[in-house]
Image (spheres, rainbow, N blue to C red):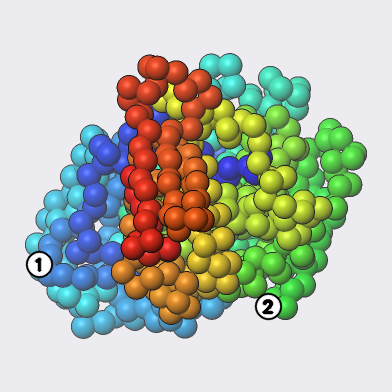
Amino acid sequence: MATISTSALYLNYIMENDTWEEDKRLPTGIIPTSYRVALKPDLDLGKFTGSVEINIKCKENTNIIVLQAHNTLHIDTNLIILTPTWSNLSSMTDTMGQMMFSNSSHPNIASIKRNPTTDELIITTVEQMHIGDSYKLYIQFSGKIQFFNLKENYNNDYFCGMINLQLFMKIIHLFYSPFIMTSMLINCTRRVFPCFDEPSFKSRFQISVARPRNMTTVSVMPVDYSEEIQGDWMWDHFKISPPISTFSISIFTSELEKGKTIYIKTNRGKYTVQYFYNKYADKKIRNDTRFPFSKTIQFLEGYLGITFPVPKLDIVIIPSFIYNEMNTLGTILQNEYMSLIPSLIDQWVLHTITPKWWNNLNITNILGLYLTKITTINVTAKSSWYEMENDQTYSILSEPDQSTYMYKYFNVFKGEWFLQMLRESISEHTLKKGLFNLLIKNKYNTFDEAMLWDSLTEQAWKDRTLPADISVQTLANSWLHKPVFPIVTVKRNYGENSAVIHQHVFMRNYNSIARQYYEPKEHEWTEEEKANEMVDS
């Protein structure tokens, strides 16, 4: 069975905590356009310090700025500075651009409040800020580095924010080299620095990280330059990222050793892949460079129509990593056994084009699983869709026990099968072109389920592979928003030019108890009905 990727981990986190249902959404009168983040994690002290400069823009007249900062972040409100700025973001290349004063008024801060329940940091100004005005918001902060212990802290809430994995690795492999990483799961970035911590607020990021001289740091983008600071410390300043959500950011600092650099060239660009291992890693794992990066990335670039979004990919191998794999833009953390294809697909479908809100992650998982299968077939020895399936999938569908862990992904599997059916009915060309249009139109932006179905419908109507009175949304609703999986049997009567369609729920033990809840239905087609009519019985 094709692997479900990191986005499924986010989905599981949501379902366990109902985070997105409880969250109060941020107002949209003020939006971020870029960030400059500086972080200095110190393992000896067990804490990190930092600062963030956020360029913000007014979308409506207001005197309130609302962003998010977890209550574990210490913020000196006396050091918060708000100044009018202008930044030519469209021409950002290797620097953040020169800041210049604009015609924006110079607002004075009236009050700063924190809401520990919603994590909101609320800044009220004396003067009104007006539509089109741009400002720079500067905040200093500090926080505690979270220690993650496998035996005591196997809990998502602990694996959130700035983390020290040293103890975790000592338990597993007696490996004493320190790991410092950020885990930007849902609502976790606000534990590392104040930000607009929702997926729809996509911005450019320039990240700087201080590290001991003997350690290496990787992040979203390649290092632009490094500089020495007092003692045995260095600052690594990373290049500016494309517009991304806060959960797409990562920082990983360690004493891991670099493997051989892999150089990739496709029809659209050149990239590098860098592995990182601990010095006790199995030599077979360290020397395994057989994964077809060039073939995989070139296939996905052609299929999705978007160049690989960053110039490098760092792959950090963490032995026995309990989450199997986690990825952010430009960085993949995984154990020694996971397939890379799902994480590569997430570089496009999760980080370049992003779900509008957390409850849209289900459709991201569906797309990711479908693309994983089609990519695997095209770049590996797998020769058919049948080889990509697994008995476990059928167990989920045949025994819909909502208390089981895997049932959480029931609609993911069902949705991926729905895409396979679309591929056979509206044609692979139409499906591929519809996905292509969706990604091109929403590159570095957000999408939801309705936008996917609309894109496929428009392309199907254009290609005349779907009747004009039927939409993909209608078909998807009947398949994806019902709790079970249907089995449809068609019996043709060629003599009478008719057909009988019999539908019942797919269950392994289809007994009398199941029948009272899922009674089968029949519908008879006569010659008066159109041959291509879709019946939802």
- Identity, as a three-letter code, of the amino acid under mark 1: Glu
Observer-nearest of 457 and 284: 457
Q: CA distance from mark 1 to mark 2?
A: 49 Å
Q: Is 490 above or below relative to 57?
A: above
For the N terminus, the image quarter is: top right
Q: Is residue 390 left or right of residue 526?
A: right
**Mark found first going from the N terminus, 1 or 2:** 1
Q: Secondary structure at mark 2?
A: loop
Looking at the image, residue 436 sits to the left or right of residue 374; the answer is left
Q: Quadrant of residue 85?
A: bottom left
Q: In the drawing, what numbered circle is on residue 127?
A: 1
Is disc 1 in contact with disc 2, using a CB cutoff of under 8 Å? no
Can residue 489 be seen here? The reply is: yes
Q: Where does label 2 land, which residue?
A: 268
Which one is closest to the eye, mark 1 or mark 2?
Answer: 2
Image position of 310 with respect to 394: above or below? below
Query: Residue placed farthest to the front in the image?
Result: 495
Position in image of residue 35 (x %, y %): 41, 63
Residue 54 horizontal/vertical position (percent): 36, 62
**Residue placed at 40% from the left, 29% from the top?**
16
- Residue 509: image tag: none
* Number of residues whose C-alpha sits closer than 10 Å to that of mark 2, classed few (under 14), some (14–19) or many (20 or more): few
What kind of residue is marked 2? Arg
Q: Is residue 256 left or right of residue 26?
A: right
Residue 220 makes an appearance in the image: no
Q: As rendered, which of 79 and 532 lies closer to the eye?
A: 532
